Amino acid sequence: MSSRDFHLMDIATQFEELESHLRGKTLEDKERWIATQGELTSLGLTFDLPHYRFQSASGLSWLFFIRGDEIGVIGDHTMIRRKKEPIQPPQTTTGSSAPDRV
């Protein structure tokens, strides 16, 4: 996907695509590109990571941070990251062959 084909509308649902699109760019280039997609406000550093507020042209607004090539989306008392490795089924601890119920 070329940069002309990718439009940022919702960081929470597009952060993996955003990471891929911005991978290898400098922090300043990442900020500059994101700012072309909507309103970007720098919130300063927290835990030595730059934090931002982004509001897209569609009106969706999110807080996020940039750590290297990763985007961390901050929700209401949560941080959104998708687990990239497959989720393993729970291990049985009772000695039976039936899986544990959750």
Image (cartoon, rainbow, N blue to C red):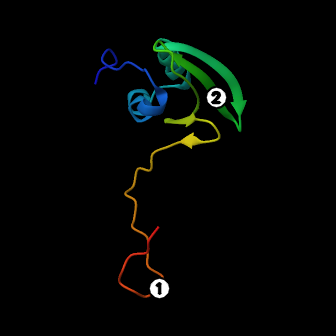
- Marks 1 and 2 close (CB-CB < 8 Å): no
**Residue toward you, 64 or 60:** 60
- Asked if residue 68 can be seen in this view, the reply is no
Mark closer to the observer (1, 2) = 1
* Picture residue at 62% right of the left edge, 24% below the top: 52
**Percent coordinates x, y for residue 95 in the rendering:** 43, 88
Q: Quadrant of the rendered structure where residue 16 is?
A: top left
Q: Is residue 59 above or below residue 80?
A: above
Mark 2: few/some/many CA within 10 Å (<14, 14-19, 20+):
many
Q: Amino acid at mark 2?
A: His
Mark 1: few/some/many CA within 10 Å (<14, 14-19, 20+):
few
- Asked if residue 76 can be seen in this view, the reply is yes
**Residue toward you, 20 or 90:** 90
Q: Give the residue furthest to the front.
A: 101
Q: Quadrant of the rendered structure where residue 15 is?
A: top left
Q: Amino acid at mark 1?
A: Thr
Name the residue carrying label 2: 51
Indicate which disc, 1 or 2, sits on the residue closer to the N terminus: 2
* Picture residue at 38% right of the left edge, 31% below the top: 17
